[in-house]
Image (cartoon, helix red, strand yellow):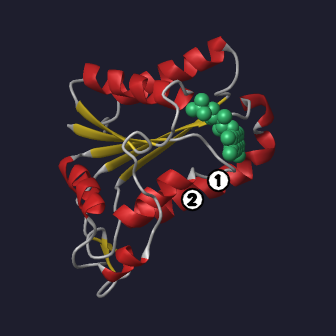
Amino acid sequence: MHVLVVLSHPDTKSFSHAISQRFMDGAIEAGHTCEIADLHAEGFNPCWSLEDIENEGSSPPKDILKEQARIEKCDAVCFVFPLFWFGMPAMLKGWIDRVWSWGWAYDQLDDHNKSLQKDRTAIMLIPAGANPNSWEPYTEIEKSMRNIWETGTLGYFGFKEKRTHILNGSTGSDQRRENLLNDAFEVGVHCFRS
Ligand SMILES: Cc1cc2nc3c(=O)[nH]c(=O)nc-3n(C[C@H](O)[C@H](O)[C@H](O)COP(=O)(O)O)c2cc1C
């Protein structure tokens, strides 16, 4: 199986980069192939613009066609991004807004909920600074985030299998971070479990 890893972080020394690498190590060990879309390194422009609107459903801009082609080749997409204000960074949000365009991702003419995409798996690996011991007040927010991402964003795109992993304590002790890196490896190994 082929996995597209969409990474949203500008710093190659970040924990998010390390997580994406360990996930890929696991997936490759399990016999899968991986391609990385490092949005900052590649200079992706996340600003939805008039050009996007005017070409919707007909001839999307070249940078969007390139991203769509990468998705078409894959069986799963793994999103790696740090939790920002209980949401995703603007870079990744903009990638989704621009790349999952009408006429390619979904068809609102006949059926509002109809995806034009094949069944795929979506995995989200989300380093979060908050320590697991201080997460309890945020459990309701976490439920809302999962609902918005899994039902709204990923579900609306047409992902069938959706797995969200919030990696709490990403700025914690070395031991904590090593445990999270090992978790990411295991997610990679089992990314196509049934
Ligand atoms: C703009 C910004 C917003 C953040 N918002 C949250 C948040 O809402 N919840 C949280 O647990 N951590 C939050 N953090 C902490 C990051 O999630 C944490 O620094 C990151 O996971 C560390 O991984 P990295 O090395 O890949 O950046 C925020 C950090 C920044 C810079």
Is residue 94 left or right of 82 when viewed as pictured?
left
Which secondary structure, mark 2?
helix
User: Looking at numbered disc 2 in the image, what kind of residue is underneath it?
Assistant: Asn
Badges 2 and 1: C-beta atoms under 8 Å apart? yes
Name the one closer to the observer, 113 or 24.
24
Query: Which quadrant is the C terminus positioned in?
Result: top left
Q: Residue 128: x and y, percent?
A: 64, 36
Q: Which residue is mark 2?
A: 147
Q: Position of residue 186 (x, y in %)?
A: 42, 23
Q: Quadrant of the N terminus?
A: top left
> Does dot 1 land on a helix, a strand or a loop?
helix
Q: Residue at x 30, y 61 (%)?
A: 64
Question: In this rendering, does residue 113 appear at all?
Answer: no
- In the rendered structure, which amino acid carries the disc numbered 1? Lys
Position of residue 41 measured from the top left corner of the image (x, y, whole percent): 40, 39
Residue linked to disc 1: 143
